[in-house]
Amino acid sequence: MNTESASTPLPRHDDLVDERLVSLYFVTALAYLFISMLGGFLMALQLVHMNPLRGIELMSPGRWRMIHTNAIAYGWLANAFLGALHWAVPRLTLRPVFHKGLSYLIYGAWQLVVLSTAVGILLGEAQGLEWGETPVWIDPVAQLGLLLVAINFMAPIVKMKGPMYVTLWYFMAAFIWTFLTYAMGNFIPQYFLCGSSAGAVGGLFIHDLVGLFVTPLGWGLMYYFVPILLKKPMWSHGLSLVGFWGLAFFYPLQGIHHFLYTPIPMFLQHGAIVSTIAVEMVVMTVVINFFVTLRGTGRAFYDNMPLRWFYTGMVFYFLTCLQCAFQTTLPFQALIHFSDWVVGHAHMVMFGVFSMWLQGIMIYLFPRLFKTEWYSKTLCEYHYWLSAVGLFVMAADLILLGVFQGFWWASLEMWEVSVDGSQPFWILRLVAGLSMVGGFLAFVVNIYQTWLKSKSVKTTSAA
């Protein structure tokens, strides 16, 4: 926490937080989330032989699949995190970001990076690296953008005196790790390594993008918002430190578990397996800390909508890491590698955890940004239940399908047997995806109507 002198007058909220920029980031993030959902929907239609864009090269499923993943990582998650950071960092440090103009420059430049990446992918200029498909001519711009983000947010943090709250530990780590991770994944395999060495680095990049970019920002924001909403401190500061240092030590070692049974040395594969299982132990301490903090105020899970999103995401996080601890063992990999089990796992972590946390943050902040209550609490309920149930059904469906696919392939049946057998699961996946899209549309309608409501309230007050 900040230990500024109590006699120093606290700066006004308007001097600290640029609410217009926060809103701009959130709305832009939601636009990319819709694009990503559209890409996922097109892929789902392709799998059940209903591709509406058959024969159009620019709209081929392989390219839209990359649009789907990149729009989630760099369009939706990055923009939503930047919006939340512009709210949280100034309030934690009691100082504005380094420069307001730089914030708007970063906003514009980042949208240029994301849109240029999409154009490059559609034109067939993607790099051959999972999550790193950004064309080579975009990488230096993106790298510079990450450096500017670190400078803009680190400036108020380094000026603080006294001990820092754990949220800022996570944020500082994320700014450094993300810059290094992006450089590692997008430059080293492209220009300096090849073969299994490049594969090992690529595996580290794939996993570190989640663990060293998304995870520290997500957990950091939870350590900020949950105590505010519960109106009490975290149960254990010690466990929060265990979570941070456990993430820092074990997570960077995991990436090679994406390449088990490959020519990469087995001692590296075994190390990745052990560190993955260790992270599940670390995650248990973090989840326990948050749920014991909820003790005595459990009713807030039902009554407080943002908290409901936060804690649902934490349950999915625990399940995701538990699943990961099993799926990265050699016997499990022999069965489920390349199957839809992995797809279900990816959806559970990216939507079930981090997207839920970010939507919960938006549900908390939009009424404060618009200076009015939500237009419809019913739409808030529809948004939650359609999203949560849709995601649970999709993840469970794909994880179960992955087991079936593994046994079909192991039995040496014709490939078409697994494709035909997957059809009922893929149809259910499509229905679950439509449920999630329905929840998203309920959210967007609610945001728009709340904004209109805020305009009418301002007009009435002025009159």
Image: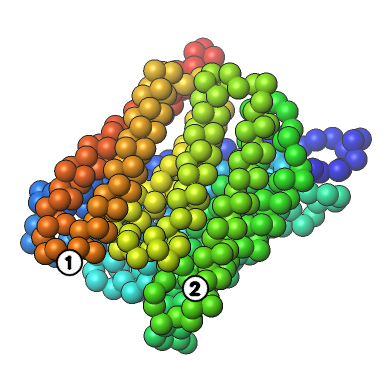
Q: Are marks 1 and 2 in contact (CB under 8 Å)?
A: no
User: Label 2: which residue?
Assistant: 269
Task: Out of 124 and 318, give the one closest to the viewer.
Answer: 318
Residue at image point 86% right, 43% down:
3
The image quarter containing residue 289 is top right
Q: Is residue 164 visible?
A: yes
Q: Element at badge 2?
A: helix
The image quarter containing residue 34 is top left
Q: CA distance from mark 1 to mark 2?
A: 27 Å
User: Label 1: which residue?
Assistant: 412
Q: Disc 1 marks which amino acid?
A: Leu
Horizontal side of 297 relative to 254 (left or right) equals right
Q: Disc 2 marks which amino acid?
A: Gln
Horizontal side of 188 relative to 411 (left or right) equals right
Dot 1 or dot 2: first in sequence order is 2
**Where residue 13 appears, x then y in whole percent?**
69, 34
**Where residue 138 appears, x then y in whole percent?**
41, 71
Relative vertical location of residue 263 with respect to residue 213 in this rendering, above or below:
below
Horizontal side of 35 relative to 72 (left or right) equals left
Q: Is residue 95 visible?
A: no
Residue mark closest to the camera, 1 vs 2: 1
Task: Out of 444 and 105, give the one closest to the viewer.
Answer: 444
